[in-house]
Amino acid sequence: MKPIFCARRMRNKLSLALLVIVAALAASAARRPRYGGTLTVEFSGRVWLLDAARPQNTLEDQIVDDRILTLIADRLVTLDDHGQPQSALAKYWQHDADFKHWELFLGPNTKFQNGSQISADAIVSSLRASNPDWKIDEGSWSHGLYSKTAIALVLEKTVTVDFDLPQPDLPYILAEPRNSILLRKSFGAVVGSGPFRITTWEPGQHAVLTANDNYWGGRPFVDSIDIQMSRAARDRMIDLDLSKSDVIEVPPESARLAAARGSRISASDPTELLAVVFPRTSSAAKDIRVRQALSLAIDRASLVNVVLQKEGEPAAALLPQWSTGYAFLFSAPFDPSASQQLAAQISPPPALKLGYDSADALARMIAERIAVNAQAAGIAVSAQPIASDAPAAPALDARLIRLPLSSPAPGVALQNSIQSLTAFADFDPSLTAPLANPDDLDSLYSRERALLDTYEIIPLVHLPQVVGLSPRVRDWMPLRSGEWRLADVWLDGASQ
């Protein structure tokens, strides 16, 4: 009887092993990337005219513009999963020892989605539209023609760029959505060479992007992306709960509540700065003591813990810690007593009108919280909503703004932030001049320190990008900087 029992036990073990193997194979097949299906994405912003060369009206609108551009168009350079420059339309590049002269070599036989060749002339035209202060000469290899910004000289299959100052981060600049290579049509439409092409366009409301079967980088997994614009936060959350949407923007302050309700949430590292900036037209804030007193009065920890429900980080620097590595060297103490003493020295007592975007619920809550903090320190602050479509901006003493991190390269990000801030604050020209060495962290720190010492901008919090995902979305792997990679996403349950 003993041999029979052993044989029976052996058969049972073999059967169990086979079941485990079959189950593993079934699970592997279920998780294998699949082609097909429509990915539905909802945004709060809206875009009327898609164009890399034209900044959108609001941050939300610009985000939609950038997201769509990265899907329909390529750039000379792209960023990999670690945020490092990789070849795209430019197959490789080289520079001189001073980082002032760059040569970018184009790949052969790359075409736009309409079948036309991506020629040197097309690249010249596209870059000129996005960088009007660049001097671009197609088909010439002339050196010695310099401007205060840059000269781009283009030959067949080659682009050369010359700078007066070292520009070690040029690949990062070329990887920005604003430098997408587009073929512009006379009636306002644009054609790219990206993994998707626009097949439906309802300005400000709706767009459908269809997979480009002939994409040089490989066909995307999903067949199409259905984009819904101008969707309110509540409507986006309802659509996600009802499986009517696959990817939605989630306000950072709602992330924890959404996760507690069972929603699948993905949050990036901090990629956006919320700050107070003082317009050059403000007379009430001309005295630096007013700005210092307001900074001391603001409880940034409370903004993060209460208003943002712990989704974000208190900010004392323009760029987040993960970007520069030196943000911890800046401090923004909460000291109501010192604020009150400083405000008491000013006559008449400071009274400020703080403007915020009327369509931004988070900005409204932050502005109101700042007003409460300021009142406790003896500073009268009134929160004033600003409509983005107002014919004229109201007279303000301060404004709440949101600055996105435009690049994982800190030099590029800081330079772009400074350029954005010059639309509001009247900084000394020495603080807004191009960085002499944007790759040197000591230089970046010194410039940022000099800017913050003016108190013309007061950092408040660094915000992440928060996304809600449906259960069927697979391989969701955005870059650390927050850039989405929808061409790599596939849908569980889609047909092979």
Image: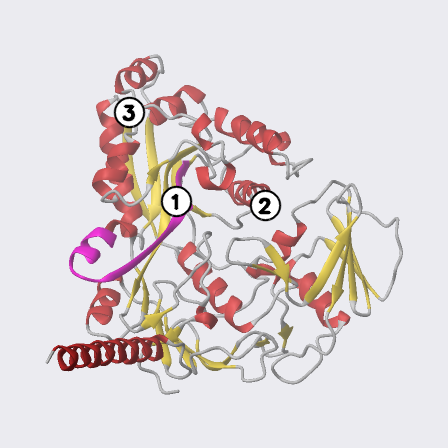
For marks 1 and 2, give the CA distance: 32 Å
Q: Is residue 270 magenta?
A: yes
Q: Which residue is mark 1?
A: 394
Query: In the image, is 90 to the left or to the right of 482?
Result: right
- How far across and down, in percent of the image, does residue 204 sit? 41, 71
As drawn, the label of residue 412 is 2
Q: Residue at x 44, y 62 (%)?
A: 484
**Does dot 1 land on a helix, a strand or a loop?**
loop
Amino acid carrying label 3: it is: Ile
Amino acid carrying label 1: it is: Pro
- How far across and down, in percent of the image, does residue 430 sit? 64, 30
**Does dot 3 land on a helix, a strand or a loop?**
loop
**Quarter of the picture holding the N terminus:** bottom left
Q: How many marks?
A: 3
Q: Earlier in the sequence, mark 3 or mark 2?
A: 3
As drawn, the label of residue 466 is none
Using the image as rendered, state which of residue 353 and residue 256 is in the foreground. 256
**Does dot 2 land on a helix, a strand or a loop?**
helix
Query: In the image, is 192 to the left or to the right of 205?
Result: right
Asked if 292 appears above or below 244 in the picture, the reply is above
Asked if the residue under mark 3 is in contact with the one under mark 1, i.e. CB atoms within 8 Å, the reply is no
Q: Residue at x 66, y 39 (%)?
A: 434
In the image, the segment drawn in magenta is 254-276
Asked if the residue under mark 2 is in contact with the one under mark 1, i.e. CB atoms within 8 Å, the reply is no
Query: In the image, is 178 to the left or to the right of 306?
Result: right
Q: Earlier in the sequence, mark 1 or mark 3?
A: 3
Q: Which residue is mark 3?
A: 379
How packed mark 1 is, by other alpha carbons closer than 10 Å (few <14, some 14-19, many 20 or more), is few
Query: In the image, is 379 to the left or to the right of 284?
Result: left
Q: Is residue 165 magenta?
A: no
